[in-house]
Image (spheres, helix red, strand yellow):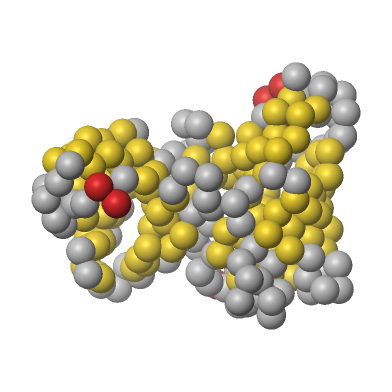
Amino acid sequence: QQQVKQSPQSLIVQKGGISIINCAYENTAFDYFPWYQQFPGKGPALLIAIRPDVSEKKEGRFTISFNKSAKQFSLHIMDSQPGDSATYFCAASMGTYNFNKFYFGSGTKLNVKP
Amino acid sequence: KAGVTQTPRYLIKTRGQQVTLSCSPISGHRSVSWYQQTPGQGLQFLFEYFSETQRNKGNFPGRFSGRQFSNSRSEMNVSTLELGDSALYLCASSQGGSQETQYFGPGTRLLVL
C-alpha cells in the first residue's frame, strides 16, 4: 500500500513552460515533505522540502505548494529547462522519532522539450 | 568530500542464491539507510542503521538483513533470492539526526535470473 501517491507517472513540457507534479497522502502524522530529483545512473538528490506549518516554499525556479486540509502537496517547476529532465520523487516522514524513515512516491519522469 | 559509494554497481544472481551489497557513507555521516527502487513502486525503505544498530525498518521479509560497522560502512544481505528481488538498491547516508537530507549513492543494480 503506497503511503504517498504521486501523479502523473510521466510529463512532457515545452522549454519555458511550467511543470507540475502532485502528491497526496492519508497519514496525518506526516510532518516533513521533501522532493528528490534523480538523473539516470545517479541516486536521488534533495531538491526542496517543506513542513506543514507553511503553505508554500520557493527556491529559485522550484516551488512546493502544500494543502494541509486536502493532504496534498505539489512541486512546480517554473521556466522548465531541458536540464530539468529527470525523475522526481515526493516523500514524507512522520516525526523525529522515526529518524530517517521516508515514504516515497512512485516517481514522475519529466521530459522538457527544447 | 567524497560522496556515498556503493559496490558492486551491477550484479547478476540466480534464484536461491544470496547476495551482499556494500555501502560507504560520506565521511562523518553515522546514519545509513537502504532503499529498494523498482519501476512503478518508487523507493521503498528497507532499514536504517546508526552506530552499528538498526533503528528503523520497513516492511520487507526477513530474507533482507543488514549491518553497520564501527566505521559506519554498511552492508545489506538478501538470502534465498527471488525473481522479484531484481531492483536497484540504493544506500543513503546522513549525519545521524532525524528527518535529515539523505545523500544517496548511485545504487547497485541487482538482476535475479
Q: Position of residue A86 (x, y in %)?
A: 36, 46
Q: Quadrant of residue A37?
A: bottom left
Residue at 35% x, 40% y: name it: A108
For the C terminus of chain B, give its image quadrant. Answer: top right
Residue at 25% x, 47% y: name it: A82
Would you say residue A67 is visible in this rendering? no
Query: Which residue is outermost to the left?
Result: A16
Name the one closer to the observer, B97 or B93. Answer: B93
Q: Is residue B37 above or below residue B83?
A: below
Q: Is residue A13 above or below residue A45?
A: above
Name the one closer to the observer, A33 or B37. Answer: B37
Residue B67 left/right relative to B47: right
Q: Position of residue A79 (x, y in %)?
A: 14, 55
Q: Position of residue B61 (x, y in %)?
A: 76, 37
Residue at 68% x, 25% y: name it: B84
Residue at 82% x, 21% y: name it: B15
Q: Position of residue A84 (x, y in %)?
A: 29, 51
Q: Quadrant of residue B13?
A: top right
Query: Which residue is outermost to the bottom?
Result: B28
Q: How many marks?
A: 0
Would you say residue A110 is visible in this rendering? yes
Query: Which residue is outermost to the front?
Result: A114
Q: Is residue B15 above or below residue A106?
A: above
Residue A71 left/right relative to B36: left
Name the one closer to the observer, B55 or A41. Answer: A41
For the N terminus of chain B, give its image quadrant. Answer: bottom right
Q: Quadrant of residue B18?
A: top right
